[in-house]
Structures are given as C-alpha cells and as structure tokens.
Image (cartoon, helix red, strand yellow):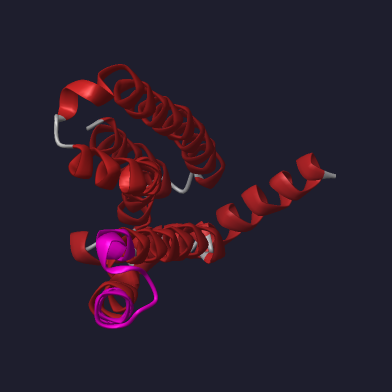
Amino acid sequence: MPAYALSSTAAALVGNQIGGLRVKAAKYYYYSCLIIMWFVSVGICVFVEAYKLVLEERLTDDNTLQGEINTVYHLFALNIFLGSMRTALKGFLRGLGIQNSVLPYHILFQGGVMTGAIAGFLLTEILPKDERNLGVWVSMTIVEFLMFIVYWGRVHICDWHARSMKIIKRTNELAGTMPSDTQGLDQNAQDELEMQQKLVK
C-alpha cells in the first residue's frame, strides 16, 4: 500500500534530519509527506467508493449480502483513510525514535475499548440483530480514529529539538566521542530555534 511506502520514506527522511540537528528540514519533510499522504488517502477512498458504484451488482447476486455490504461500506472506506494516515504518522514516530510511546494506547484502545465496544454491540439490543456486523465496524472505526488522534498528538507534542539533541548525544556516546565534541550542540539548537521564531514573526 502507498501508506507503508510513504511511512518508510518519512521515517528515513525525518530520522536523517533529526540525527543531523536539522529540525527545520525535518518538519518540512513531515508536513510535505503528511499532505501527500492526505491526498493519496482521499484518492484511495474515492476509488473505493467508485468501485462500489460501478461493480456493486457484480459483487454478489445475494440481495441480503448486498444490503450488508451497503451498510458497512462507507465505514470501510473511512477505515482505509484513517489507517493510511495513521500508518504515515507511524513513520514520523520512528523517525523521532518515539514509536514505543504509543504502545500503551494500542493495548488500551485495541485490547480494551474495541473488545468492549464489539461485545456491547453484539450482546445488547443497541442494534437490530440483522445489523450486528455494523456494530463491529463502528467499533473498529472508533478505535482507528482514537489511534489516529494519539499518533497525531504524540508527533505534535514532541519537542523535536530535544529529541534531536538526545539522539545526537546518545549516538556520540555509543561512538565514543569525547564530551567536548558535543558541547556546542546546545548552542546550535538554540540558534536554530531563535532563527525559526524570527521567521515566524
């Protein structure tokens, strides 16, 4: 899928810039890749909807099955959009080295919220019996949206300058670089931050 290709690209581009203390360039790649992924995701959803309109009657001759497909198809397309965007954001998390920070949310939302929501739809009378499959897709969509918000929020609340400094210093430590070789990094980061603030003003 395009999302996985762009995720790997984003991880490489952002990670390379972060590792070189080029935060401004890293954010440029971030916004560029995110905009591209948004257009690609919307394009995929449009194609999926068009595919259904053109080949709806050819999918199956079973009227009951056609009704079930029509019931969940829009949620299916929405899941494609959310999943594609979240996959792209995963690449940015890897580039920043904070991909493990979202693991607790996977356990909470996918292991707890989704399971509870599906059980609620299937074991109660919230939906008619012939629409119980819709409950499963609603649960998946809710969790996918929550995970998208978590990924997006984690990327945006991260201090990219601090991450860059930490990664560079850690790399220098592993490489055996003397502390004197890294003492100018803090000033370089501060200079870049002040330059960005001036540009914004």
Q: Is residue 40 visible?
A: yes
Q: Quadrant of the N terminus?
A: top left
**Residue 200, placed above or below residue 186:** above
The C terminus appears in which quarter of the rendering? top right
Q: In the image, is residue 60 part of the stretch drawn in magenta?
A: no
**Residue 123 painted magenta:** yes
Residue 200, percent from left and from top: 78, 43
Q: Residue at x 41, y 42 (%)?
A: 17
Task: Classify residue 137 by image quadrant.
Answer: bottom left
- The span picked out in magenta is 112-135
Q: Is residue 50 above or below residue 5?
A: above
User: Most extreme residue toward the right, as rendered?
Assistant: 201
Numbered marks: total? 0
State the residue at coordinates (30%, 54%): 94
Which residue is more in the foreground, 73 or 86?
A: 73
Give coordinates of residue 70: x percent, y percent.
33, 41
**Residue found at the very far front of the displayed protein:** 63
Q: Quadrant of residue 115?
A: bottom left
Q: Position of residue 93 (x, y in %)?
A: 36, 56
**Residue 90 vertical placement versus 147 (above, below):** above
Task: Name the foreground residue: 71 vs 34.
Answer: 71
Residue 33 shown left or right of residue 56 in the figure: right
The image shows residue 166 at horizontal and vertical percentages of: 40, 66
| Closer to us: 153 or 79 | 79
Tell me: residue 78, above or below residue 62: below
Q: Residue at x 35, y 79 (%)?
A: 125
